[in-house]
Amino acid sequence: MAFIRLLAITALLTLFGPTAWAQGTQVPFGGLQHDTTLPVEITADQLSINQQDGSALFVGNVVVGQGEMRLSAGKVKVEYAAAGDDATGRISRLLASGGVTLVNGDEAAEAQEAIYSIDTGIIVMTGDVILTQGANALSSQRMVVDLNSGLATLEGRVKTIIQTGGN
């Protein structure tokens, strides 16, 4: 269902052109700030642990939850913080690939890949990014979400269709 919606939005953006073009467009994301200190829950079909580099690889129908925010992907690599300073077992970054969907509140974003740096509260999504906010849609090649401020910056030939409420 989400894939069909994504195709429809992409077709509209391609066929009818943009209502507005911009580089480095900033938009609110999730309507609220997100607490990056909340626990992270990960589910997947398979888990591989690499003792040498201290990472974990979750593969197949991966869903990452933190508070109200959800990230799903085909594969997510979890990198842990360096040892010391009470960092043992603390997640540093999540590297998602294989069709990434990020949902926060009523908004959703899709991309080919995403990196979530938990310490900074920054999510960088790359590759055919599509952000939907209600009936409005934006597309770009890169989106940086700052969970501390609740803002997202879209970069790389930004396209948008804004519904005006008219016919």
Image (tube, rainbow, N blue to C red):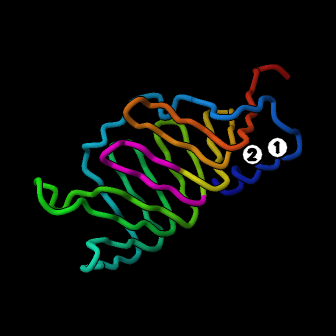
The percent coordinates of residue 57 (x first, y second) are 37, 73
**Location of the C terminus (image quadrant):** top right
Which numbered marker is on residue 64?
Answer: none
Q: Please name the residue shown 80% across and 43% down the image.
A: 13
Is residue 50 shown in magenta? no
Amino acid carrying label 1: it is: Leu
Q: Please name the residue shown 76% across and 21% down the image.
A: 164
Give the secondary structure at mark 2. Answer: helix
Q: Is residue 125 left or right of residue 68?
A: right
| Residue 152 drawn above or below residue 93 | above
Give the secondary structure at mark 1. Answer: helix
Q: Please name the residue shown 37% across and 50% down the image.
A: 117
Residue at the spot of label 1: 12
Q: Is residue 17 left or right of residue 165?
A: right
* Front-lying residue, 93 or 62: 93
Q: Is residue 107 left or right of residue 81?
A: right
| Circle 2/circle 1 CB separation < 8 Å | yes
Q: Is residue 91 left or right of residue 113?
A: left
